[in-house]
Amino acid sequence: MSPSSAPRRPGEPALAALGLGGPDPDPADASPHTFPDGGRWRVEIPSVEGPEALSAVLTEAAALDVPVHRVSQGSGVWMLTDAEITEMVRAAAERDVELCLFTGPRGTWDTGASTRTDSRGAGLRARGHDAVAGCVEDAVRATSLGVGCLLVADEGVLWTLHRARTRGIIPADTTLKVSALIGPVNPAAYAVHEGLGADSLNVPSDLTLQHLTEIRRVSGAPMDMYVEAPDDLGGYVRMYEVAELIRRGAPLYLKFGLAKAPSIYPSGLHLRETVLSTARERVRRGRLVLDLLARHGADGGMSPLGSRLPGELRRFACPAD
């Protein structure tokens, strides 16, 4: 979907006939940015917690004809064996899908009880040197097994891993994805995360359309957004806004979470049936949104399958050795 195109807006013909039509979109609100392949949106299926869940997602995606550019996992590298990671890398590569795994300890899984207080304390970040070290250990291990994308929930970890890839400690083409747990909510913060090394940034699903436009005036770094957010991220469902989210937020990864679904982090055999059923339903939610875009003539502009790199981004200078 190009900034100049005019897809049909939800309900607009009927509302216009009743004298209730909305104003035309302002072309100045449209994002001028794209992915390096020229696409304006990609599809991500989150919460893919292991090889079996990945197989379920890929099978369901084939059955429902849902294009998938990226799958991401939330439990963390440390919750997978080397054999499981290797199997996921192989399966994702066979379908030319980017695999993104979460790094290391974070607030609710260590001594960070302050995250449960009203003030939320330090948030869901890596507490102390040892937590950062755990994230780096996960990053080195995962990339050595072929994982090309790492999910981070701490600014210090982000900067550390960015420096690590500039030094060759992890592969230079590793992409770093900022978690929705710390997603920036204003243009200045978004630009700071880009400078720290973010290649893709989750933003909270409650940002307004105007907020997306404001961000795009200062940064072209790819944005990730839950079209449907899990309950612990607000439970928002924004399906009818997807065309406008793309118009304002491109380049944009459309993520399909599930409201009213049990938490599955950290995942394991005790949650197997929930993990698999919710994985399949996330793909189905994706099909619903793609059908909606098609009905409104707004389904153009998708990146080619297999695309993963973010293009040239602005970084802070790394300190000299």
Image: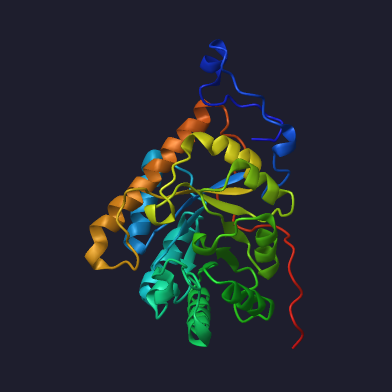
- Say which residue appears at 36% left-offset and 70% top-offset: 84
Q: Can you give x and y, in whole percent of width and height, for residue 118 in the image?
A: 43, 66
**In this rendering, would 167 be left or right of 128?**
right
Q: Position of residue 179 (x, y in %)?
A: 52, 63
Quick check: 317 above or below 300?
Answer: below
Res 77 visible? no
Q: How is the image coloured?
A: rainbow
The total of numbered circles placed on residues is: 0
Percent across and percent down for residue 167 are 68, 81
| Figure check: 122 above or below 55 | below
Residue 88 in sight in this render = yes
Quarter of the image where the N terminus is located:
top right
Residue extending furthest front?
Answer: 118
Q: Nearer the viewer, residue 32 or 188?
A: 188
Residue 136 located left or right of residue 62: right
Could you tell whether 107 is left or right of 266 in the image?
Answer: right
Can you say whether 81 is above or below 36 in the image? below
Which of the image's four quarters has the C terminus? bottom right
Residue at figure coordinates x 22%, y 66% from the top left: 270
Instruction: Determine which quarter of the picture holds residue 29.
Output: top right
Look at 67% across and 25% down and name the residue there. Answer: 24
Identify the residue shown where x is 39% and y is 79%. Answer: 110
Against 93, is 164 above or below? below
Residue 54 picture location, percent across and down = 38, 58
Locate residue 157: give its quadrant: bottom right
Seen from the viewer's position, the closer of residues 249 and 44 is: 249
The residue at the far bottom in this view is: 321
Name the one closer to the observer, 287 or 218: 218
